[in-house]
Image (spheres, helix red, strand yellow):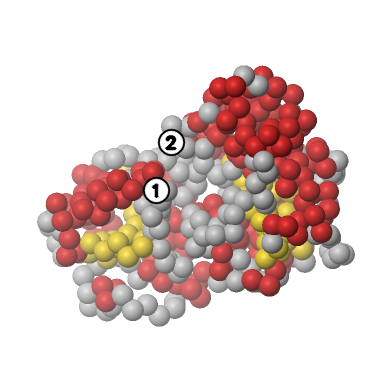
Amino acid sequence: MNDNLLQPVGDIASLQNADRRRRIALVFHGFAGGGLERSILQLAEGLMERGFAVDIVVGGTTGVLLREVPPNARIVELQKAHPWRAVAYGLLSEASAWRMLAPLELRPLKRLFRRLPSLTDYFRNVRPDAIFAADPNYNSLSVYARHLARLRATVVASEHNQPSAQAAFKGPWREHRLHPVLRRAYLKADAIVAVSDGVAADLASFANIPRQRITTIYNPVVGPDLATKACEPLDHPWLAAGEPPVILGVGRLDPQKDFPTLIRAFARVRAQRPARLIVLGAEGHERHSKYIAELKALPARLGIADDVDLPGFRHNPFAFMSRAAVFVLSSIYEGLGNVLIEALACGTPVVSTDCPSGPAEILEGGRFGALVPVGDDAAMAAAIAATLDRPPAAATLRERARMFSVERAVDRYLDLMFEER
């Protein structure tokens, strides 16, 4: 991790763009261990390899992926403004925000715009040449901060998940009163990107954005270091030669990933043959503490505790993927499903729920891995067993994964950022 480049909050006002290279700001929430964060760090590395200066502009500098920030990327942490200052900035930047001045409607506005003054200061001082933003909060902040800073840089707003599904769980799309503010911000961006066709269709329908305004660019997932990491030594005893086959899941331990269905499916498989299950992933938000406790207790209830391991987050999941017999994605919904691509790149057979959206696009409707209904542990177990019996050729899977390369994504993003406006 490049600690020497971490800018303290108070230094934003003194930041400048002294580098003669074109500078791209990547604006998002922080360094949690999810697919969104990994893909943005991959994008940062790909952009720097093309000769660009990169600022990673985040809401917070904690998280398990902080150590994976590429060398020479500058990290800028945005500070939270006083709520009323944040609201004032929001009202200056967006006319539709005035509709929320009723006392009961101010709280979501304060939350949305809390870092708007800080981001505006960053844009005024550094004046990046292009801005890539991710997630509804930071997409909106980037558009409005650009306006307040009188900056001409291109803003690319990217949607990484299903807005309609997220609205039921978390985030600004859950707050209906914010929808006009968010929608107007998206429409003011120079480009709107979705990470899959499914996300593009959902965003168009849910947010009432013309579908033709949205471009699909698959995440930058497969980089030159993935194969190297996949071959790194691993000391987990279950993945040694001669051990029973291991089924693997990777993702945050929260309801979206639906690991209970995977555990129940594994119990069905285990009843028929020797096998083991490993689930890698950091614990999700504290609001999911009850869910996590029940998840960890489930293997014992099913009588399979000796064959299930939940070792937490691992910085190198690829070493596990390359040694697993089958990788399983059990999610209720996804934006794309980066972990599926990573498993394919490791040559590992996959089984996935046919959730909205991404897996069916990655696997071409089942051509490169089985698709099963969401929440159906019996169908998942049958697909896992069939894949164990007849695994596809690793070379075929790796070839498919190349469609989701860092190089391909960087090419497309640069086209959006620097095309004639």
Mark 1 vs 2: CB contact within 8 A: no
**Dot 1 lies on which element?**
helix
Quarter of the view holding residue 207: top right
| Foreground disc of the pair 1, 2 | 1
**Residue 169, disc:** 2
- Identify the amino acid type marked 2: Phe
Name the residue at 69% across, 49% down. 132
Q: Which residue is mark 1?
A: 286
Q: Is residue 363 above or below residue 171?
A: below
Which type of secondary structure does the marked residue at label 2 adopt?
loop
Of 109 and 168, which appears nearest the observer?
109
Type of amino acid at the residue the image marks with label 1: Glu
Quadrant containing the N terminus in the rendered view: bottom right
Would residue 304 be seen by someone viewing this image from the given angle?
Answer: yes
Q: Look at the image and tell me whether residue 155 can be seen.
A: no
Q: Residue at x 83, y 53 (%)?
A: 125
Viewer-proximal residue among 188 and 63: 63
Mark 1 or 2, nearer chain start: 2
In the figure, is residue 193 to the left or right of 399? right
Horizontally, residue 368 falls left or right of residue 100, namely: left
Q: Position of residue 123 (x, y in %)?
A: 79, 49
